[in-house]
């Protein structure tokens, strides 16, 4: 018969760590993301994040741990003249943050840039949400 302390030690060592799959950069900068992400998806080797809306704009990115650069997409949730005006303001904001050439990304509401590292994404996200 095993002792209670031995059984408890076995139980503790067998527990699954829910936070083990979070990338280190995410947990290090959790204060930047807390309450500002609408959706997070984590698979082995990839991480997807979608921000809450900020002035009718969403910021999203897929991070792959085997790649240095990260594609960041912005989606404007507007139509017509307001869409074009907001996209122009977003383009100017991106230029002020060092991203001069956003590209169309699939549909007219989306624009994409490439960040050199996940650290650049974290900095841009912090600036976007401020």
Image: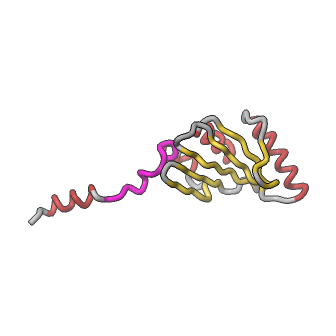
Q: Is residue 66 left or right of residue 80?
A: left
Number of labelled discs? Answer: 0
State which quadrant residue 1 falls in.
bottom left
Colour mode of the rendering: secondary structure
Asked whether residue 25 is drawn in magenta, I would say yes
Is the stretch drawn in magenta largely helix, strand or loop?
loop
Quadrant location, the C terminus: top right
Q: Residue at x 60, y 55 (%)?
A: 37
Does the image show residue 21?
A: yes
Q: Vertical placement of 69 versus 111: above or below?
A: above
Residue located 82% across and 59% down the image: 78
- In the visual, does 80 lie left or right of 55? right
Where's residue 10, x and y in %?
Answer: 22, 58
Residue beneath the point at 60% across and 53% down: 49
Residue 3 location in percent, x, y? 12, 62
Q: Residue furthest top?
A: 98
Q: State which region is magenta.
A: 15-27
């Amino acid at each position: 018969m095993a002792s209670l302390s031995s059984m408890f030690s076995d139980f503790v060592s067998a527990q699954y760590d829910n936070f083990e799959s979070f990338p280190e950069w995410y947990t290090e900068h959790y204060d930047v993301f807390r309450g500002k992400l609408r959706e997070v998806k984590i698979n082995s080797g990839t991480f997807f994040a979608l921000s809450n809306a900020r002035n009718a704009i969403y910021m999203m990115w897929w991070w792959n741990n085997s790649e240095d650069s990260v594609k960041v997409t912005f989606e404007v949730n507007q139509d017509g003249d307001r869409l074009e005006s907001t996209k122009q303001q977003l383009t100017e904001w991106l230029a002020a943050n060092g991203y001069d050439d956003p590209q169309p990304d699939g549909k007219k509401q989306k624009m994409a840039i490439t960040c050199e590292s996940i650290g650049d994404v974290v900095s841009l996200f912090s600036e976007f949400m401020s």
